Image: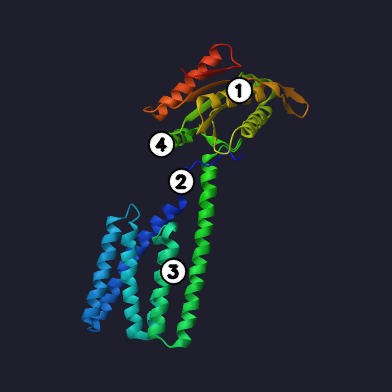
């Protein structure tokens, strides 16, 4: 089983969202600057109505850029901005012919940054359909179909870019969240995982349990056999745990030889059975690296979430249970009281 399981973790390093925020700042202020220049040019041409409409859109972009300079603007505001630019581009095609098409491509490019992936396809196809209709309405057919095809090429390239960015973000999340040695989540993510699972358990009225185990005398293993052997023990322990738990269970590795197993939809009795199986698999199967071999036991605590308690209560309960197992002789499992 992949230790990441199905936990919907967010990450402190969201490359795509940060990139979008920087891009949107440039779009808002850049579009405002360009539109203000066009306002001046149209004023010199004494096209006052056109100049006034472009100026209004420029002020709108400037205000959005100032208000949302530190966060992404709501989707409806971005949609209004795109519609306003689309109207200006359509008017440009009506009055200037094919020269107005040059404004279509930067507008399409903006869409890739302005909208979340959930609605991106709907928005981009809507914008494409409108622009295609406008080009067929105001331009000769021999130009219109070529422009329509070129817009599709731009949409395709942009979509590939989004897919690549999404893959990069997933890889970054996994690299940031997981321990490279064992593939388990870092201890830093335990709070987030437990909070999410408690929220889900209470919403669905389902049980949630946690097992926390620690390899007994793991430091002595490192001292006797070396850290390379110790690393192999940790990798093998994580692998043994994965073979016994379910796809929905989530493993978190703390410092040293300590592992936490978050078990959604798991009553206490089932968690105890699975915890016993894990401890038996650890203690009864020797760890071997080349010519070196040793047996290791583990101590574990188990706790079930109680309605009304928070994540700290649950983690503290399982910690206390594991400490009791350690103090009462190790190589055993204790249930939180």
Which label sits in the foreground, 1 or 3?
A: 1
Can I make out residue 106 in this image? no
Which label sits in the foreground, 2 or 4?
A: 4
Q: Is residue 36 above or below residue 287?
A: below
In the rendered image, residue 294, in percent from the top left (x then y), is placed at 72, 21
In the rendered image, residue 57, in percent from the top left (x then y), is placed at 27, 69
Quarter of the figure with the N terminus: top right
Q: Is residue 287 left or right of residue 140?
A: right
Q: Which residue is mark 3?
A: 125
Task: Name which of mark 1 and mark 2 comes first in the sequence.
Answer: 2
* Contact (Cβ within 8 Å) of mark 4 with mark 1: no
Callout 3: few (<14), some (14-19), or many (20+) C-alpha neighbours within 10 Å?
some
Q: Which residue is mark 2?
A: 13
Whole-angstrom CA distance, mark 1 to mark 3, is: 56 Å
Whole-angstrom CA distance, mark 4 to mark 1, is: 27 Å
Whole-angstrom CA distance, mark 1 to mark 2, is: 37 Å
Q: Which residue is mark 1?
A: 276
Total numbered labels: 4
Task: Name which of mark 3 and mark 4 comes first in the sequence.
Answer: 3
Query: Looking at this view, is 320 or 88 the one in front?
Result: 320
Q: How is the image coloured?
A: rainbow
Callout 2: few (<14), some (14-19), or many (20+) C-alpha neighbours within 10 Å?
few
Q: Is residue 321 above or below residue 227?
A: above
Task: Name which of mark 4 and mark 1 comes first in the sequence.
Answer: 4
Residue 195 found in image quarter: top left
Which label sits in the foreground, 3 or 4?
A: 4
In the rendered image, residue 107, in percent from the top left (x then y), is placed at 39, 70
Q: Which residue is mark 4?
A: 199
Whole-angstrom CA distance, mark 3 to mark 2, is: 30 Å
């Amino acid at each position: 089983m992949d230790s990441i399981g199905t936990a919907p973790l967010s990450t402190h390093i969201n490359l795509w969202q940060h990139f979008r925020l920087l891009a949107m700042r440039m779009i808002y202020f850049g579009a405002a600057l360009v539109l203000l220049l066009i306002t001046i040019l149209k004023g010199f041409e004494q096209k006052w109505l056109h100049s006034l409409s472009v100026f209004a859109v420029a002020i709108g972009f400037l205000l959005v850029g100032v208000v949302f300079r530190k966060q992404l603007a709501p989707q409806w505001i971005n949609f209004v901005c795109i519609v306003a630019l689309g109207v200006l581009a359509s008017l440009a095609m009506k009055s200037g012919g094919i020269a107005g098409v040059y404004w279509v491509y930067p507008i399409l490019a903006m869409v890739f940054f302005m909208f979340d992936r959930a609605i991106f396809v709907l928005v981009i196809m809507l914008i494409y359909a409108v622009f295609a209709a406008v080009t067929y309405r105001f331009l000769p057919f021999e130009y219109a179909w070529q422009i329509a095809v070129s817009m599709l090429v731009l949409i395709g390239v942009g979509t590939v870019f989004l897919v690549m960015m999404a893959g990069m973000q997933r890889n970054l999340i996994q690299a940031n969240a997981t321990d490279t040695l064992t593939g388990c989540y870092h201890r830093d993510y335990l709070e987030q995982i437990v909070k999410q699972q408690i929220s889900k358990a209470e919403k669905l009225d389902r049980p949630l349990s946690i097992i926390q185990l620690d390899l007994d005398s793991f430091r002595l293993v490192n001292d006797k056999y070396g850290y390379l052997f110790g690393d192999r023990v940790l990798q093998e322990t994580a692998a043994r745990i994965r073979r016994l738990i379910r796809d929905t269970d989530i493993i978190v590795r703390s410092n040293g030889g300590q592992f936490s197993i978050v078990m959604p939809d798991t009553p206490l009795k089932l968690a105890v059975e699975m915890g016993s199986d894990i401890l038996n698999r650890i203690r009864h199967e020797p760890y071997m690296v080349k010519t070196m071999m040793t047996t290791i036991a583990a101590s574990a605590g188990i706790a079930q979430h109680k309605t009304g308690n928070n994540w700290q209560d649950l983690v503290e309960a399982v910690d206390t249970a594991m400490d009791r197992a350690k103090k009462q002789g190790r190589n055993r499992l204790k249930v939180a009281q």
